[in-house]
Amino acid sequence: MTPSTESYPLVIEGLTGSTMTSDLKTMLGRWFALSAPVDRRFYLQSGLVLMAVRILGDSLILWAAAGSKLFDAMTPLIYIAPTFGLRGALLLDIVESRTPAVVAAVMMGLWALPFMWIGVSMSFRRAQNAGYSPWFGLAFFLPVVNLLVIATLCALPSRPPRAPLVANEDGAKSLLKSAVVAIAYAASFGVLVTVFSVFLLGDYGAALFVAAPTVMGTIGGWRVNRPAYRGFGAAVSVGLMACVLCGGLLIMLALEGIVCLAMVAPLAIALTLLGSVFGALFARRSSSGGGVTAMAIVLPIIGTTDAAFEPEPRVFEMTSEIVVDAPPSDVWPNVIGFSELPEPSDWLLKTGIACPVRARIEGEGVGAVRYCEFTTGPFVEPVTVWDPPHRLGFNVVGQPEPLAEWSPYDEVYSPHLHDTMLSQRGQFELIETESGGTLLRGTTWYTLDLAPSSYWRLWSDMVVHRIHMRVLAHVKQLSESRG
């Protein structure tokens, strides 16, 4: 007979009693488990403990990165915001605008991922423990009403568990057929959500890049394990293949190019595989397939509410520098305009990402217009600061597409190429060194309208830095040869 889940020790009692170590191991095991039952008391107490740990961890990361000002800005209200978009806006306004990209990625990605796993897994298991289909736990993702659903899960009593499915040897003969069907279902779902989010909502948010791959994997993992349970290995394999097929379909339909898909691949594959594990768990614990329909309904709701709460794009700053063995007076002419650059040697800039070719200026002083030619077109940069030979500042009023996509088609219809990453202004500083040389520093301020921006900012900062260094190295070569 299965013991009652209400007999598990209290979280708080376990942490403060004499059996602290063993109870802590039990608690961690139940948090990260796939099938351990979760009663209402453990669900409630775990939620409170995990929120406290999350807030404390976020605060310590911010304290280490930027000091007490960011620590003072933290508030628990951030963590109960009802939508992904609003929660991200509140937290990222504090984090990303004032910390390096790596710090933001660690805080919003690596550190947050275990909490996401625990929250989703425990919600699914709590729903099952209360006598409902595990699919009910999907409401953990549902904006606006998710707090009400969590409160309901905290109140519902436990009920006797249903017998799980077991592996069926006869079903092994139809594994290939089930896998093909599961891959097709999951990949088709991914394409449909992409079309809905991008072309109907015009939103590249958490619904598209976080919830969609997770749900896509869940659908594949569930379908391959019905009606015969085949385990997590089959689910993960199906999830991976569905992710690849989804990307291939987006390329074939001219909705995306290879470069952008390669950038999103690490995030999408990781979340799809995570969802595949959940899907296998659902297939083993529930005979209901209504959750697939529920997922198809939930994702548009997530996307619509996130789009409604979408904040204004944040402005990020990226600075790169190089030491030039020449005085600022020799460097200045090569900053305001420079000759043809050679073909890029950087592997990243060889992928079709727009990179600088030459620069020229029309006029002199504030009001002059600088044109920086890139491989995809010119940046138009009216001068706002003219302080030779120390500082040149400019706004960006016109810019080309950020890359020329790799695709079998001449044109790829990807709206994000036009307005999700935009340069706002730039600056060159020329600082004379003690040896008579020049510390040449280039800075770009840009907006990024992609979520999770902590992930995409890793790519954008890397690209902007590589472009900076291509220009700075060329200016260094011209200035030193002139001397």
Image (cartoon, rainbow, N blue to C red):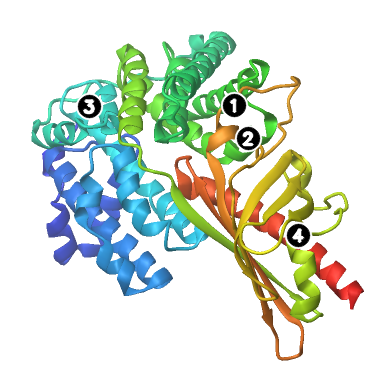
From the viewer's perspective, is the residue at label 1 or at label 2 nearer?
A: 1
For the residues labelled 1 and 2, say whether their Cβ atoms are less than 8 Å apart.
Answer: yes
In the displayed structure, 146 sits above or below 430; it is above
- The residue identified by callout 3 is 128
Image point (68%, 35%), residue name: 259
In the displayed structure, 270 sits above or below 52; it is above
Q: Residues within 10 Å of mark 1 (few under 14, many from 20)?
A: some
First in residue order: circle 1 vs circle 2: 2
Task: Give the residue type at disc 1.
Answer: Ser
The image quarter containing residue 438 is bottom right
Q: Nearer the viewer, residue 143 or 475?
A: 475
Task: Give the residue type at disc 4.
Answer: Val
For the residues labelled 4 and 3, say whether their Cβ atoms are less than 8 Å apart.
Answer: no
Calculate the distance from the C-alpha at mark 4 to the C-alpha at mark 1.
28 Å
First in residue order: circle 4 vs circle 3: 3
First in residue order: circle 4 vs circle 2: 2
Where disc 1 sits, the SS reads: loop
Name of the residue lying farthest toward the bottom: 434
| Image spot of residue 317 (x, y percent) | 53, 59
In the displayed structure, 384 sits above or below 36; it is below
